[in-house]
Image: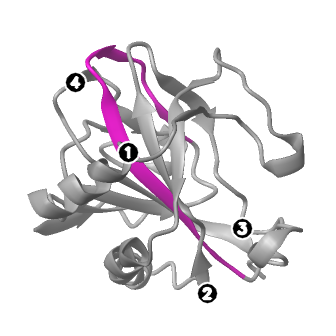
Amino acid sequence: MSFENSKALWWKFQSALTEVEIDKILEISKNETWQSAEIGQSSYSKKDNLYRSTDVKFINDQWLFDLFWPYMETANKNACWNLEISMAENFQLGRYGLGGHYNWHVDGNGLDTVMEGNMVGLSRKISMVCWLNEDFEGGDFEIHKAHAMNENIIKPSKGTIIFFPAWTLHKVYPVTKGERFSLVTWFCGQPVK
């Protein structure tokens, strides 16, 4: 496993997950029903296939939190974000089929708080993406040039994890062949002051 950063605006752990870990995550996808992804959150979410075309499943298995939390702590410290984090949201397993994509978006702004469930008063601060396969074409991940000094288009590679502040503008290009699988979550804490 190796890691790299782009002037601390994002942090990547190359080939961090083992085949066994990846297989265990993908096995979950066989046990749950996929649903069409929506944009927005909770009460104001909606489907918009022109903006986002992805199937998702939500997972809250404790072993996933245990697996990814230390990577988040390392990225948070080494990238010098030093954001206060107290919890992670449930993991979202994503399946991007032919044409699957997600246009420019941010995951949170670090200031707005959630008003429901166990997230009341917390804000998304660090986003995570973990790629689970690479036997597809297209589906590249881009961080907007406003947030990246060097490399800003990342070709997904199996087992690689990337972290970035939730307010970083990013997108997923359309898949042109095969299916792209990824696992995402958001690490949350008190709003940035």
As measured in the structure, the alpha-carbon distance from the residue carrying label 4 to the one carrying label 3 is: 33 Å
Look at the image and tell me in which quarter the N terminus lies. Answer: bottom left
Between 157 and 80, the residue placed more toward the observer is: 157
Hey, which quadrant is residue 172 in on the image?
A: top left
Mark 3 vs mark 1: give the one in front: 1
- Disc 1 or 4, which lies upstream in sequence? 1
Q: Where residue 137 sits in the image (x, y, percent)?
A: 23, 20
Q: Is residue 65 visible?
A: yes
Decide: marks 3, 2 in contact (CB < 8 A)?
no
Instruction: Locate residue 5 relative to residue 188 in the image: left or right.
Output: left
Q: Earlier in the sequence, mark 2 or mark 1?
A: 1
Q: Earlier in the sequence, mark 4 or mark 3?
A: 3
Mark 3 vs 2, N-terminal side? 2
Q: Tell me where the magenta segment starts and ends, as one range.
A: 170-189
Residue 18 seen in this snapshot? no
Distance, label 2 to label 1, CA atoms, is: 27 Å
What label does residue 136 carry, if any?
A: 4
Question: Where is residue 22 shown, x and y percent of the image?
Answer: 21, 55
Between the C-alphas of marks 3 and 2, the distance is 13 Å
Question: Alpha carbon of mark 1 to alpha carbon of mark 4: how far?
Answer: 18 Å
The residue nearer to you, when weighing 52 against 155, is 52
Q: Locate the C terminus by quadrant.
A: bottom right
Quarter assignment of residue 68: bottom left
Q: Is residue 175 magenta?
A: yes
Separation (CA) of disc 3 from disc 1: 30 Å
Mark 4 crowdedness (10 Å alpha carbons): few <14, some 14-19, many ≥20: some
Tags 2 and 4 touching, CB below 8 Å: no
Q: Earlier in the sequence, mark 3 or mark 1?
A: 1
Q: Which type of secondary structure does the marked residue at label 2 adopt?
A: loop
Residue of label 2: 86
Which residue bears the numbered disc 1? 29
Q: Amino acid at mark 4?
A: Phe
